């Protein structure tokens, strides 16, 4: 047994951290935050050059063919740096859907473009309120043509293509849902940017009007593929959340050491110390659950569904907890636009919803634990 | 990153499994499996005798104190082998609870500071469970502030004469030996005047009085010392160096990882899986599911945190203060879990003991849980440890730091 990343993987993490510290400073994040650019194009190009976008994509499709543990360590650093790029939508959602269900031709077309940074992808699943569920998919597909509206779609306004969940049956079962691949630059697509909690990663509404689409995976397999994609993305997002938790904990700790009040470092007051200790505890539990998720993801273990839900819940809670209390440690200064605290607070709360909210994942976890116990 | 056994680990596992399968006291397996924190386990047997017999059997076959060197009665196993053993030992591992302090803290302190002939005399019977040890640190005046203790040791010829009182001593009523932290010099600041000894608990002048706890049980004791004589060769470490010696003991407490901490979660999940509420099965209830999921990820987070620590340990890294989170998280969690299980029982949750649902399993847990949050350091002390030693925040302000011990005020008002 060895429950840790290898030295090579840790080296990759250091490399990613160094790269992001240089290319993705809070100042760079703010360019996107302030609406001056839809995402950081230079950083995206740099990530492609470093091989980070295709780290888990096989070499035959233009990637580095390293694996998912390697992607996990990079994800952690993306979260730590609060990177304003469509990494999660392109790499965790679109690329994973292609890897799981894409035909050889589809993989050859899109995966090398993802790895090289030429194509941004996303998953179009949600249609307004509600969590992932077949009954919430109303967008209709008939004869390879889509009609309907998806929102919110992560990075939808800058994406080149989308994996779209559509209704192809009316039996009331999971088999009613099928996936389609849509080139968003072709006709029949209208895209509208939406304001959102975290402007460093955009959200959009996409309207499909008699839009041509090619099937991704077999007809009727959509929901089972989606479940796998969401589980895999849950683990990868958990690492981003762990990175964000650690960074906000560090920010709070550093401020508590620098700031003097009542003649003492505020970090010497037990109320502040204990708040930071509790942040450390939730970040540590999240990290450990995420490591288990990483193991399950990288080995495609039968435990993946349960491990993914646990990592998702734990990391979501930890990032929200740390980001919120980081502002509290900072006091009034933490609530100003100039301090970076709110960027992480925004990201933490946006990420808590992106793959379905906590209550959805709580349900998933309990269902999966029951299934395991029954087996 | 992987959870598979290496060939050596697999071999160790199959050896352990075969031996446990052939030797464990199977007649108690069911009762041990259904026991949880605070609940007396064996109805028709004396648990102390059953535990001692199991420990002796393990020792005779070379399965006792896996992490100790062989010459002192251990096996010289790796940290991973300890984990494998505890996975295979399963519910029978609960029988080792009364040996934890001796094996995890007293033994390692003896190994670090006792004379060689004492190690060879005292350690093997400790490993085999024939002799039980306790740790005499806490006092009425020094709980979390251990260095505030007042029990005096005064030199008299070749002996030391001990007078004073200890408290919260787990298992003192059935212990044969103990390690004892005393004050040998009250005229210097508190951490500098301490000295450590080990002693025979049957020595004249030692009086053990069990404490009746809030739960109604009596696991802890007060221990009184009246002119108890300890020969100087039973001193552990130098005179005045007792604080450093005790830190070794406490560091070893921290490295006693691998032993699963009770969180109450498996019990609650099992309970909710079959419980019917007014509106249907509890496990289908949205609010119940949310609670369960939140505790599930804490329990699994603790489990994998401990596995990360074991992986680090097996690479030769020392266990650090970050391991304080186990008790911090599990302590309040078990209290909350028990409270919630009783909430689900409605008004009938008030009934306890054999008359209650599940023979009072959660009621017993509720009444025992406050102790878990206090013993071995309160939640507040654990948070201080994390804040100061992991995060590097300033230490609490200590107004008694450079003051001679006998000049420190003893009353608040």
Image: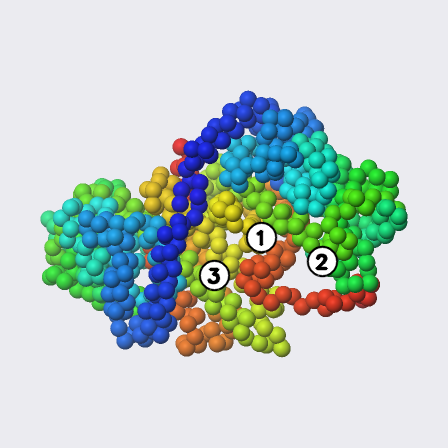
Q: Residue at x 57, y 41 (%)?
A: B259
Report the residue marked by disc 2. Answer: B145
Whether residue B93 is visible to the viewer of this picture, yes or no, is: no
Badge 2 density bin: few <14, some 14–19, many ≥20, Cα 10 Å: few
Report the residue marked by disc 3. Answer: A321
Please tell me whether residue B20 is drawn above or below residue B36 in the rendered image. above
Colour convention: rainbow
**Which one is nearer the viewer's eye here, A181 or B327?**
B327
Q: Residue furthest top?
A: B22
Locate residue B190, reporting x and y percent: 76, 61
Give the alpha-carbon distance from disc 1 to disc 2, as whole Å: 17 Å
Badge 1 density bin: few <14, some 14–19, many ≥20, Cα 10 Å: many
Q: Are marks 3 and 1 on the same chain?
A: no
Give the alpha-carbon distance from disc 3 to disc 2, as whole Å: 31 Å
Q: Secondary structure at mark 1?
A: helix
Locate residue A123, reporting x and y percent: 25, 55
- The answer to whether mark 3 and mark 2 are in CB contact below 8 A is no
Q: Residue furthest front?
A: B116
Report the residue marked by disc 1. Answer: B324
Q: Residue at x 19, y 45 (%)?
A: A217
Q: Is residue A157 left or right of residue B119?
A: left
Q: Is residue B411 left or right of residue B324?
A: right
Give the alpha-carbon distance from disc 3 to disc 1, as whole Å: 20 Å
- The answer to whether mark 1 and mark 2 are in CB contact below 8 A is no
């Amino acid at each position: 047994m060895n429950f840790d990343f290898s030295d090579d993987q840790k080296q990759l993490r250091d490399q990613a951290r160094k790269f992001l510290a240089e290319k993705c400073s809070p100042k760079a994040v703010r360019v996107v935050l302030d609406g001056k650019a839809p995402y950081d194009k230079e950083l995206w190009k740099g990530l492609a050059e470093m091989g980070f976008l295709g780290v888990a994509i096989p070499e035959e499709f233009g990637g580095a063919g390293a694996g998912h543990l390697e992607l996990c360590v990079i994800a952690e650093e993306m979260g730590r740096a609060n990177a304003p790029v469509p990494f999660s939508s392109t790499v965790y959602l679109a690329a994973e859907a292609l890897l799981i269900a894409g035909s050889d031709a589809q993989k050859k077309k899109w995966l090398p473009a993802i790895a090289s940074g030429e194509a941004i992808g996303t998953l179009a699943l949600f249609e307004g309120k509600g969590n992932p569920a077949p009954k919430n998919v109303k967008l209709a597909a008939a004869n390879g043509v889509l009609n309907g509206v998806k929102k919110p779609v992560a990075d939808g306004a800058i994406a080149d293509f989308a994996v779209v969940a559509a209704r192809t049956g009316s039996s009331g079962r999971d088999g009613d849902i099928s996936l389609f691949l849509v080139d968003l630059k072709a006709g029949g697509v209208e895209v509208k940017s939406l304001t959102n909690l975290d402007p460093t990663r955009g959200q959009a509404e996409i309207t499909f009007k008699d839009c041509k689409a090619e099937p991704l995976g077999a007809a009727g397999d959509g929901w089972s593929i989606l479940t796998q994609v969401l589980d895999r993305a849950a683990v990868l997002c958990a690492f981003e959340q762990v990175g964000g938790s650690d960074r906000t904990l560090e920010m709070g700790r550093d401020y508590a050491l620098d700031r003097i009040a009542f003649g003492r470092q505020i970090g010497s007051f037990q109320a502040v110390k204990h708040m930071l200790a509790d942040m450390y505890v939730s970040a540590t539990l999240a990290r450990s659950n995420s490591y288990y998720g990483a193991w399950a993801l990288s080995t495609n273990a039968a435990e993946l569904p349960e491990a993914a839900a646990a990592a998702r819940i734990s990391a979501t809670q930890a990032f929200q907890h740390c980001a919120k209390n980081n502002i509290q440690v900072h006091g009034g200064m933490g609530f100003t636009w100039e301090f970076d605290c709110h960027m992480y607070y925004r990201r933490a709360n946006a990420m808590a919803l992106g793959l379905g909210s906590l209550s959805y994942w709580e349900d998933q976890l309990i269902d999966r634990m029951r299934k395991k116990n029954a087996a | 990153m992987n959870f598979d056994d290496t060939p050596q680990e697999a071999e160790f596992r199959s050896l352990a499994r075969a031996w446990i399968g052939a030797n464990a006291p199977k007649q108690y397996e069911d009762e041990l499996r259904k026991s949880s924190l605070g609940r007396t386990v064996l109805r028709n047997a004396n648990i102390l005798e059953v535990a001692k017999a199991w420990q002796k059997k393990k020792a005779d076959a070379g399965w006792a104190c896996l992490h100790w060197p062989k010459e002192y009665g251990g096996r010289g196993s790796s940290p991973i082998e300890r984990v494998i053993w505890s996975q295979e030992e399963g519910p029978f591992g609960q029988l080792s609870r009364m040996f934890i302090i001796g094996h995890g803290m007293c033994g390692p302190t003896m190994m670090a500071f006792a004379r060689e002939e004492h190690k060879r005399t005292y350690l093997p019977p400790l490993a085999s469970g024939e002799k039980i040890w306790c740790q005499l640190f806490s006092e009425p005046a020094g709980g979390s502030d251990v260095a505030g203790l007042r029990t005096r040791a005064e030199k008299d010829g070749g002996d030391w004469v001990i007078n004073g009182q200890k408290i919260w001593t787990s298992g003192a009523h059935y212990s044969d030996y103990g390690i004892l932290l005393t004050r040998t010099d009250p005229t210097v600041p508190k951490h500098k005047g301490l000295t450590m000894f080990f002693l025979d608990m049957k020595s004249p002048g030692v009086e053990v009085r069990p404490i009746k706890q809030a739960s109604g049980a009596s696991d802890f004791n007060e221990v009184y010392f009246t002119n108890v004589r300890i020969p100087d060769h039973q001193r552990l470490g130098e005179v005045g160096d007792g604080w450093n010696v005790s830190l070794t003991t406490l560091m070893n407490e921290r490295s006693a990882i691998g032993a699963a901490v009770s969180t109450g979660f498996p019990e609650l999940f099992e309970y909710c899986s079959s419980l019917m509420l007014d509106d249907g099965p509890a496990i289908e209830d949205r609010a119940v599911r949310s609670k369960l999921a939140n505790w599930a990820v804490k329990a699994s987070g603790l489990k994998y945190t401990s596995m990360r620590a074991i992986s680090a340990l097996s690479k030769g890294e020392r266990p650090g203060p970050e391991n304080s989170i186990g008790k911090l998280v599990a302590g309040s969690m078990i209290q909350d879990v028990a409270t919630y299980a009783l909430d689900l029982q409605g008004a009938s949750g008030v009934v306890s003991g054999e008359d209650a649902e599940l023979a009072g399993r959660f009621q017993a847990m509720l009444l025992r849980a406050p102790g878990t949050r206090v013993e071995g350091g309160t939640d507040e002390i654990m948070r201080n440890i994390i804040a100061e030693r992991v995060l590097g925040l300033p230490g609490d302000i200590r107004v008694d730091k450079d003051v001679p011990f006998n000049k420190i005020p003893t009353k608040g008002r």
